[in-house]
Amino acid sequence: MFLNLLTDRQKASFFALATKVVMADGGVGPEEAVTLDIRRYEMGEDVSAPPDEIYGEPNTDVFDTRKSQMVALAELYVLAYSDDDFHEDERPILRKLADVWGFSDDECTEIERWAKRQAPLSVEAWAMFGKFGAI
């Protein structure tokens, strides 16, 4: 939804973070795959995640504005909720990012509440687009 606000470099790092989050629970469920695809298409189909950022430390420095940090964190929370199961292995990844970027517990709670409502709508919309031949 908001990934168009990121630079190309931020998009690549976001995609690495997104991949890391959906893989955290040991597998990528169908809803997570759909939500990840939605984000990739939104950023441009040619975006790719640097493997060293998927399997190593994330590049948090590239998110150098509060806006880019907010976009990344909110979109990652949506991914975490996309399969209706916010797995406990996903939470530390998001908490670490929130801490690095200086988000308070109250801010994270508000972002998480929004993401919990938004995630199923993203999956539903993608299915509707497919049903109507739009993708």
Image (tube, rainbow, N blue to C red):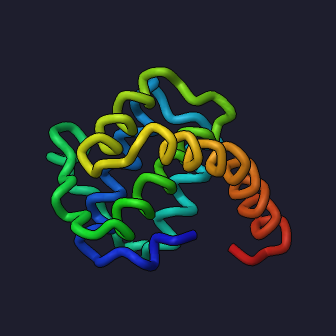
Name the spot of residue 79 as percent of width and height, x first.
54, 46
90 relative position to 52: left or right? right
Residue drawn where x is 45% and y is 37% of the image: 105
125 relative position to 70: left or right? right
Name the spot of residue 55 as percent of width and height, x first.
21, 37
Q: Quadrant of the C terminus?
A: bottom right
Residue drawn where x is 36% and y is 57% of the image: 15
Name the spot of residue 54 as percent of width and height, x first.
25, 44
Q: Is residue 26 visible?
A: no
In this rendering, the answer to whether 7 lies above or below 61 is below
For the residue pair 11 and 45, the one nearer the viewer reads as 11
Name the spot of residue 111 as percent of width and height, x first.
55, 49
Residue drawn where x is 36% and y is 74% of the image: 6
For the residue pair 111 and 15, the one nearer the viewer reads as 111
Q: Is residue 58 visible?
A: yes
Q: Quadrant of the N terminus?
A: bottom right
For the residue pair 134 and 116, the one nearer the viewer reads as 116
36 relative position to 58: left or right? right
Residue drawn where x is 68% and y is 33% of the image: 84
